[in-house]
Amino acid sequence: MIKIPLESDQWLEMDVLEQVDVICVAFEEAWQRGNTPKISDYALLISVDRRAELLRELIIVDKQCQEQRDAQTAKSTSMSSQATLTLNHGRQDTDIEFLDLEANNSAPGTAMELPTAFGDFILFEHLGRGAFGQVYRAENTRTGKQVAIKVPHSNLISEPDEYRLFIREARNVANLTHPGIVKVNDVEFVNKVPFLVLEYVDGKNLKEHIDEFGMLPVRSAVLLTIQLAEAAEHAHQAGVVHRDIKPSNILIESPKQNREAQDSPDLIPRLFDFGIAKRNGANTLVTQPGVVIGTPAYMSPEQACGNSRATTNRSDVYSMGVVLYELLTGSTPFQGTTTQILAAVQADEVPDIRHRNPALSKNLAIVCHQALRLVPEARYASAIDFANDLRRWLNGEPVLGRPIGFAEWAIKKTKKHRVEMRCAMIVAILFSVAGALAWRSQQSHRQLVADLLISDPQSHLGPRMPGSLEDWLINVPDSLADSQPLIAGIHSSPPEKLLKIGNALRQHKSRSVATLRQCLDSGNLDSVDQLKLACIYGVVDPEGFENLGVATRLTDWLFGSSCFDNVEGWTELTSHFSRPLVAPLTERYAASMHSSQRAIARKWLIGLLEREPIERTVEAMMLSRVDELIDWNRLLSRRFRNPLPAVQAKRRSLNLDFGYDEDGEARSMAYANLLLMEYGLGGEESIWPLLAIAKDPRPRTYFVHQIGQSGFPLTSIIDKLSDNSDPTVQYAILVAISQCAQERFSNKELQKIRTWLVEAYESHPNCGVHSMCRWLLNEWGLGSELIEVDRRLSKEGFVKGRNWYVNRLGMLMLVVDGPVETGMPHPSSSASLELPDTFEVRRITRSFAIGADEVTQGQFRQFDPSYSAAVVDPASTQLSNNDNLPAIGQEWTSNLQFLQWLSLNGGYSDTEAANWHQIDDKSVEIDYSKTGYRLPTYEEWMYCCMAMTESHCNYGTIYTPFNDKYVFQPQSKKSGNQKISPVGSRMPNTFGIFDTLGNANEWTASKFALDGTFPSDSLDLQIVNVRAACIICGTSSSSVRPTSVRVGFELPSKNYGKTGFRIARTLAPFETEP
Amino acid sequence: MSDLDAMGSVTRWIEEIRAGASSAVPSVWNRYFSRLAGIADHGMADSPSRSMDGEDVASSVLETFFRKVREGQFPELRDRDDLWLLLLAITRCKVVSHKRHELRQKRGGGRVLLATDVRAWQNESFNLDDIADGEPTPDLMISLKDACNFLISEMLRDEKTRAIAILKLEGLTNKEIAERLNTVSRTVERKLKLIRSAWEKVFSIEFEGSNDDQDTAGE
């Protein structure tokens, strides 16, 4: 008994959770009393709207109680040693539940009350009753997922054999996974009753959809059929034929959000109910021979005559043809009683679709009819062929389907003895053709055929036999009818043989062309034979090949099939008709990600380009990867006497405004390829100027970062090093050298570079080159050679003519001779990581010097021995105390104190050093007219980060060039470690400033207004709000692409873990002027 | 200044607690519970509970729990639904609203509170770290006991539910509880859900109260 005061106020006040709990407790108590309570009894205790919630709970409690009892039984069983006693798994009443289910639903109107429990599932809604059984919308309580459940009719599983077969079939279907097929997740059992668990699709079937929304536009109908055919193809590939494709078996998924957009091509058809699907070639006992399975109007002729063994993939093609026919005309081809339809389907070609809908395009009608041929062999060989031809029609390309032939119309008229009649017709045609044949033979032609015989040992078995390929080749008929030897001959032929056949046929060009064309048009070939035949056609008539429109398909096929293990053979063959192949192949080449696939595409492409003008080669080369350039270089040098001008002409024809979208990325890469190729072809003189700082940094960056991998000789680069005319070019050359493996240089060259580096380090007038020399020597492990030089430089101080000096404390300073201007993103744009749209030009009037390196922890500790960076972030050991890491974590005002201390130690007077004072706890006044050390202003630091570039991304938009530059690498997912680099260990920028790239946050001192604006930098006295000093992030690596600068603000009192700083000072006029 | 939708923030806050708990560094919590246990050791016996109307289930729960803590068995706070988090949050909430009340009293008495101070304090006092922040005081211990008593004795409907709450707070796993009470684990899970739902209601009422305080304090 269940004692719940269901009417009491207390019960009615309870929320769902509480009511569910009370019932579950009662349910569990019933179990514990030794009963086996039924879920359905308890489910009724709660109102319908709360029932699902209760069922979810009851199903699990029930299961756990059962397990508990089983465990106890097992325990007592083993204790009493009654080993023979079988355990009672499963509950006896489940069968009854199932039968109830059947009984209830077979009599509509007396349906059981839903939701209800069914095994681990909750049935919510009865969706339908089909040939297969009952379908419910249900929830899997184990996963919480919504599913559909199909319970088969009992007659489908009543016999043991049928039962086993049913399960096997169901599992086959469950293996199909395709977006166009409603997924059968699994076969499950409730007390031995199997049922299917399907993916639940929210939508109507195609029939209902059309009833509700009316006819589809032609384009949507075709798109829908294409998707359908692709789904069917997937099933066919797995050996499953649907056998009952019809609109009510096609679900149309509700378009997300906009249901009214029924004419959008977004209709997604989902094929379901492989309920009578049979496995191809396997035992087909599920259906008895002669019993017609399917729905007459959509049934193929071979199904209509009850020949289930003859039911193949092509039967599904026919049914999809009927669906398309109906979508395009509003009715199925044949109408009448079931018997009438069955008779008509078997006897007749379907009525011309254009009689029903004259507005239809002729080609679409051809495709539709091709799918609906009476004889299976005359239809598309596969669903995908059907889909592809429909797509061709959509794209306005010529279709492969052919209008129904005379022979077939003739057969249709006789209606009987189809096969015999067909043979008779063919014989008749043969004779008429034979009569018309001129018996021409040429010696050279015979020779070619003989050549073919010799090269193909298998042919020796039956040379010159009537009906052999060789015989056929000697007497090429000019009719389709007798082409069987050719078709049979090419089926398994390698490309070499196809070429030979083509060469043989070329001797009778006009006749061969006509015959081949007929074969191709006949539609009797499978798609591979068709492509092979097209190749032969190409050899015979290269100009005509283009009109076949098969170039893309041929390319796709060769790539998509394993037959492309003979690149040379196919290349040789296809080079005879290369022109139309170049474009699809180039596209393929560019899109290939995998290197082996790329290598094949490249090899093939290079082979084809042999006969093409140089421009095609240059265009393909532009899509090359850097390590492939050398191949292109060889092709160009071998094929053309002087290829350089064509490459240069191409480069000059390009617009340098690449843009920053994805295409812009590809355009700039292609441009860099041209630069590299010019270099490789000996045209380096014209590219040097392009290595200077430019508006768009990418060609320069990509060139210097890739030259090392290109395989081109590096001699000219080394020679260019000594040309002092433009330091930014020299900087670029140094980057290029740094990207080359040292093995690329001879010992002599290496020595030459090293000597140059050490000399340039000491005396080069440009800071960028100076810093780059230091970095490169350190990279090469030669940093120790610089200690002595550093000592000299520090003593030397500022030398006129250089834009850098080393101060008394050994710190490298970049000298910037004002006034200068820099573009900077508006602070308001810095919050987002996207590229700023506008750059505001800011002017710095004073001359200043700025530290090339950040202040290190070691330096800071000299000022404050108690300083420890470890307190900032104890979790991150990488950031803990290390003299060479940047000084981080201290407050902004501590930096000001450090700088004042530094000024006094660096030889500046008290007056010059005292360039700041605290006004109150909120503001600090900074005097920029004094020459002691201070923090850089926002504009000064920005200017250094941008390093003269005008681009948002001053090293390009891909990350590879940054590998040597990142300062701070955010937490890596793998190790969980944050990595910050020692000061000065990463590659400096063009100015010679280190650590500006890759999330390099640094403090600046700038007056910052709360409205987010900055006043001009020209004032000498500024009051800085210490509550909002700003930091600037150098290149941000977390954005979509690396950006040059990013601004952020921090309260100076907060320990901002990653923020370092560098020193700056205002220069007195005499310090820069001569 | 504060146009927070009260219910919205409760939900968010609970979510934050859960999210935080699942990623919280266990050592922080272990340290916190050790300190609480220290207080409990000294303060428990002689601190009278202010709501001693019903039976004092809390004393035994807390004693058992802190004995375990002292033995090195810390509660598994990775469980995003842990009752301990709710208990602490509710206790904390009561203490905070009490403190706010005191602050408001002081405002008239001379010291001017800056708007920013209040804002910072309000924001910061409502995060997970703050629960575990600072030295727990005997006062907190009393509040904890009061809250615990109230939440178990007043807010839970039947004996089984109360028993599950107690065992859970004492640090047993769901499986152990199921075995101890001879019930299936799903029942334990369901009851815990009921308990949390009941306690979250208490929490949102407490929170709303303190939210009202916020609005007036910021003006």
Image (tube, coloured by chain):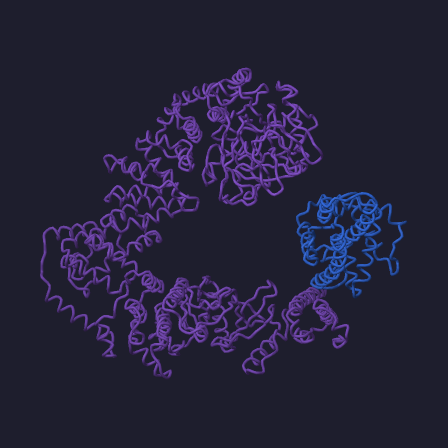
Residue sitting nearer the eye, A711 or A543: A543
Tell me: residue A177, above or below residue A40: above
Chain letter for blue, please. Answer: B
Is A833 left or right of B161, judged from the image as shown? left
Residue sitting nearer the eye, A655 or A617: A655
Residue, x 30% and y 37% (percent of image)? Answer: A647
Is A468 left or right of A916, judged from the image as shown? left
Name the spot of residue A910 as percent of width and height, x first: 66, 20
| Residue B29 visible in the snapshot | no
Name the spot of residue B17 as percent of width and height, x first: 69, 52
| Residue A982 visible in the snapshot | yes
Chain letter for purple, please. Answer: A
Tell me: residue A591, above or below residue A549: above
* Image quadrant in which you'd find residue A1057: top right
Residue, x 60% and y 64% (percent of image)? Answer: A144
* Image quadrant in which you'd find residue A625: top left
